[in-house]
Image (spheres, coloured by chain):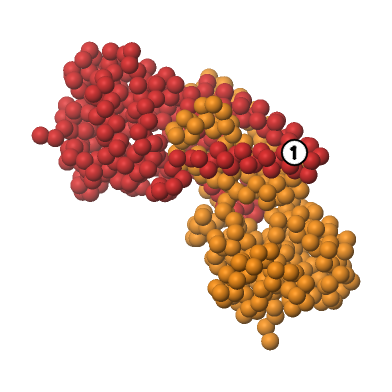
Chain colours: A red, B orange
Amino acid sequence: MSKTVGIIGLGLLGGSLAKALKAYTDYDVVGYARRQEVCDAALQDGVVSQAWTEVEPLIEHSDIVVFSLPPDTNARLFTEVAHLFKPSQVVTDVSSAKENFVRAVYESIPKGTFFVSVHPMAGSEKGGYEVSHKNLFKGMGWIVLEDKASDVYNEEVAKELADMGRAVGSRIEFVDVYAHDAYLAMVSHMPHLIAAILTQVSGGDELGELRMRLSAGGFRDCTRVAGGLPSMWREIIYGNRHNVLEGLSKMEDEIRRVKEILSQEDEGQALEDYLHRSRDVRNKLPYLTGQIKNN
Amino acid sequence: MSKTVGIIGLGLLGGSLAKALKAYTDYDVVGYARRQEVCDAALQDGVVSQAWTEVEPLIEHSDIVVFSLPPDTNARLFTEVAHLFKPSQVVTDVSSAKENFVRAVYESIPKGTFFVSVHPMAGSEKGGYEVSHKNLFKGMGWIVLEDKASDVYNEEVAKELADMGRAVGSRIEFVDVYAHDAYLAMVSHMPHLIAAILTQVSGGDELGELRMRLSAGGFRDCTRVAGGLPSMWREIIYGNRHNVLEGLSKMEDEIRRVKEILSQEDEGQALEDYLHRSRDVRNKLPYLTGQIKNN
């Protein structure tokens, strides 16, 4: 009999995972959503075999429980329901920032229950079950977080969750759980803030409306993530603020460096060299080719 | 008999303009390209009726001459060929930064020749005739630069160039020629540098390759323009560096402000408010709906 995966939260990420597991694996998938309409929609779409507006039955029926709510909400909920988990059951989550959830799990997980965190590197500035789709993870990274020194970590579970990522089309990366948030601050959380900052600098003052009319595709894409859900990104960024602050300081240092480059009387040669280096870095992004656009 | 538009430079912008004018207007279109292969391709595609690897015959045969090379290259070329223009002939350009070209034109344009600059707000991180297409301008802004105090500016010419923008599907904006570069620094040139800076901060050091493997669609889009042609962007940004430096200073001020917000012990409330304001600004971008994606 195939194992049951229970997904807590059927938003963009949880809903897409449910759809992808249904489409590309043999897992039985069940779900929790706060709103009955979302449960009904997922049942009607046939992506879950059962859905509840309470988490208790989901935990009872699942071999693998995936927390797919915003990071702090996941953490608070886990603390409440930790006592319901049984030995050999697997807890995982798909959050973008790990510190608070990992701490909550390590504090209250019952003996014998396993925990391996994963982070599918996929998302969109739009959220909700309506925009979820089975190919959200195709061609994207799927990080499995290692903590080999911990009792709750289990190699076989890690392997199973990596296989799950492969099955939904992702590239697998193994990363140490304690290094994860620092890396993510630099490639996701700090860039998100930079997009929000850029939006306000260029569009937030009395000339902003005119400037926005004069902007084009470059500005649109640079600032796309600033359209993301504020309540969700608040939890991600604030929960990882020490790393994000460090990233912002690095941006400040680099902006100072580029201001010096612009001030040189060299007809822009140093600037061209700088732009070349940036382009070389960016052209190596692993998902620039053969990737399904998720937005 | 329909007027002839001569396009100097058949790259992404010039090539797309030739294709759009051919598809959506009655203008006869002729072209100049440095390389014979590009002339041949444009002739074979039927987007120009004649093409040369020298500019002199193009100027001789055109009623409206569009400079579509990078801004400083346009400026140098204009200075060389200014004496060839005749009264009532129209000079225009499609550069992203205007200061150097406008100065070159005002210095050497013959008496009676008209000059009205336009700036189609369209582009891509890829360049060249191969990627040009007739719908590049659809739904995008098309700025007509006004300089009503100048002898070479002409209202009827401005109206004709605005109509040309409408014909290829753009929204028309009229902007004072001396204000243009300051606006564009804030919505295009400075954001371009921020994308390049972000790329190097996140991907340029010894951990960069690993971090790039952990990045996703948000990072891809925030940094898309950093894939642009360094030699072209050097001319645009360095030519407008006084305004760009001011924009970078504003970014520094705002980053400082956001670092204070992140340091507040308020569980992220001020951060969420900040993200809300950014989202509100961004959601008002005029081209977010009903626009053809150009990349």
> Outermost residue, left direction?
A1
Q: Residue at x 26, y 35 (%)?
A: A164
Q: Residue at x 26, y 19 (%)?
A: A154
Give the class, few, some or many, for how many residues have Cα within 10 Å of label 1's Cα (few <14, many ≥20).
Answer: many
Left or right: A221 in relation to B66: left
Work out whether residue A130 or residue A142 is closer to the camera in this orientation and state it. Answer: A142
Q: Residue at x 65, y 54 (%)?
A: A214
Residue B187 position (above or below residue A3): below
Residue B3, percent from left and from top: 70, 80
Please identify the quarter of the rendering in which residue B29 is found: bottom right
Label 1 element class: helix
Question: Badge 1 sits on which subunit?
Answer: A
Residue A236, percent from left and from top: 45, 29
Residue B250, percent from left and from top: 69, 36
Left or right: A274 in relation to B272: right
Please identify the quarter of the rendering in which residue B79 is found: bottom right
Residue B113, percent from left and from top: 83, 72
Residue B228 position (above or below residue A232): below
Left or right: B234 in relation to A53: right
Q: Which residue is mark 1?
A: A262
Looking at numbered disc 1 in the image, what kind of residue is underneath it?
Answer: Leu
